[in-house]
Amino acid sequence: MQFLFGDHTLDADRRELRRGAEPISVEPQVFDLLIYLVENRDRVVSKDDLIASVWGGRVVSDSTLTSRINAARKAVGDSGGNQKLIRTIARKGLRFVGDVRVTPLGADPPHLMSHSQEDAQEPSRPALPLPDRPAIAVLPFVNLSGDPEQEYFSDGISEDIIAALSKLRWFFVIARNSSFTFKGKAVHMKQVAEELGVGYVVEGSVRKSGERVRITAQLNEVATGTHVWAERYDRDIADVFAVQDEITEAIVAAIEPQLYAAENFRAQRKPPDSLDAWDLVMRGLSHYWRLTRQDNMVAQAMLEKATAIDPNYGQALGVLAAAHTFSAHMGWAEMSNAVPIAERAAIAALRADSEDPWAHYALGNVYLFTRRFDDSLAEFETALRLNPNFSLAQCYYGLTLCYCGRWQDGDLAARRALRLSPRDPFSALYYGIAAYSQYNGHNYEEAMRFARESIRERNDFVGGHRVLTASAGMAGRNDIAAAALQELRRVQPNISLGWISKEMPFKLDEDRKHYLEGFRRAGLQ
């Protein structure tokens, strides 16, 4: 169904908003809000109506609701001052007051039709347009066991992956009922993409033999026809539901960073002057995870461009906040300058979308470096509740636990991040935090092993060089300590005992003294 008002066309079936022939980028929640207002234009819609319809009854802050209403007005050329289309009724709610014409699915609006089209009006089924964020369909996994009774297991894997991916707020995931219309059918991937309006397709198979099961999965990018990622999992199947949960967790944790990487490559193929806010976030994220000073500066610049395009773009604000705190933690920026900037961006990200795990992750970082340890842990726990497979939040949750003197818990969190996403672009961080937890546990050889692995992943990662230097110092490995200190000074020229004591957020004084002693023995002054 298409709704025409003024020079706008709101296509509910294609999930597309156009001004004339020009498509307008609209966030999914904003689009849903517009649809609900237009469909219920004969009455005043209350706040509770909107929350029940658009947010499924979840708790939503007033600031989040206001930002979505403002975005909806902006998308249709309206404003809170004019209220020509979306009118606020004091103490009652909202009403769409524009003149609306309705056309059926497949009919082009008048301003897009040629004379021959107007005469013929032949029905067509065009490909669904891609939404304003990566769209993914998970096809039913194929049961290769030869036993129809095993269908429940292969279907269950597919359904669980759909449910878990749906928790990733940055992606648009096709519902189970739509994806499962292709069950048992041999169809080309491009047909799936066109009918469901997606850019990525996940497919796989399940083969059970005795008490063993083999599950294969792959992520495909339709536009290029390439396999972005593929993996095989072999498991004992004594507890079928535990295996199903474990495989789902592993697949989803692996897919998320691969989607970011694929979106970055897609954005790189576009002319620089045609990048939209999402493209800039993906480009910025690809620089952020390289963990170097120069790349961090490039990431900040791209993310600031994204927020200039859309000041309420939560994804850009969340990553921008994280980039600033990381820069300060690595000694590349003054903590007193970077943290207030990060805090403003993180709070703005939460206002834009209080359910975005990245926003809570960003605020958790801010609270860590302002020594609000309980608040920091709470924010990371919220991020992990919203997305249990968010390995980067799991990693920084572990770091915060270490700074709070709970190194065993921190070690478990860091290892869980590594298990969730062993080939993650941020894996150098995960190894670095595992190394730091082992240092706090006085396991210096193990700390050195993890630190070397961290540096092997990202040669310029400051955190890995820090832990290697201090661990070698405490272990009495003087040659290694001297070489490590030289490399540390290369990647963080301002490193000193005074900087470590002042800027690193130790909760316990004995942990501060222990870390300083390692550097002192390595020769740092």
Image: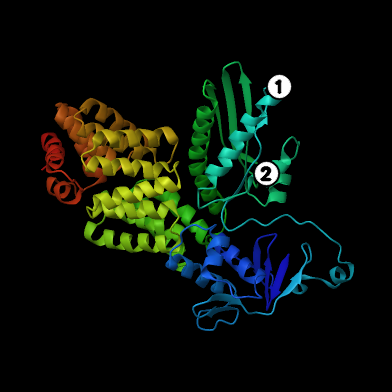
| Secondary element at image label 1 | loop
Q: Height in image: 219 above or below 107?
A: above
- Indicate which disc residue 179 carries: 2
Question: Which residue is drawn at the image coordinates 39% and 64% (left, top)?
Answer: 348
- Determine the image quadrant of residue 12: bottom right
The x and y percentages for residue 424 are 44, 38
Q: Which residue in the structure is indicated by mark 1?
A: 146
Asked if the residues shown at circle 2 and circle 1 are in contact, with their CB atoms under 8 angstroms apart, the answer is no
**Residue farthest bottom in this picture:** 82
**Residue farthest top in this picture:** 210
The x and y percentages for residue 509 are 12, 43
Q: Quadrant of the C terminus?
A: top left
The x and y percentages for residue 118 are 85, 71
Q: Nearer the viewer, residue 478 or 476?
A: 476
Question: Which residue is drawn at the image coordinates 38% and 53% (left, top)?
Answer: 360
Left or right: 119 as drawn, with respect to 508: right
For marks 2 and 1 on the same chain, the one whose residue lies earlier in the sequence: 1
Q: Amino acid at mark 1?
A: Gly
Q: Height in image: 489 above or below 59?
A: above
Q: Nearer the viewer, residue 71 or 160?
A: 160
Q: Quadrant of the N terminus?
A: bottom right
Left or right: 278 as drawn, with respect to 227: left
Within 10 Å of disc 1 (Cα), the crowding (few <14, some 14-19, many 20+) is few
The x and y percentages for residue 15 are 65, 61
Q: Amino acid at mark 2?
A: Ser
Question: Which residue is drawn at the image coordinates 57% and 56% (left, top)?
Answer: 270
- Determine the image quadrant of residue 14: bottom right
The Cα–Cα distance between marks 2 and 1, rounded to whole angstroms, is 22 Å
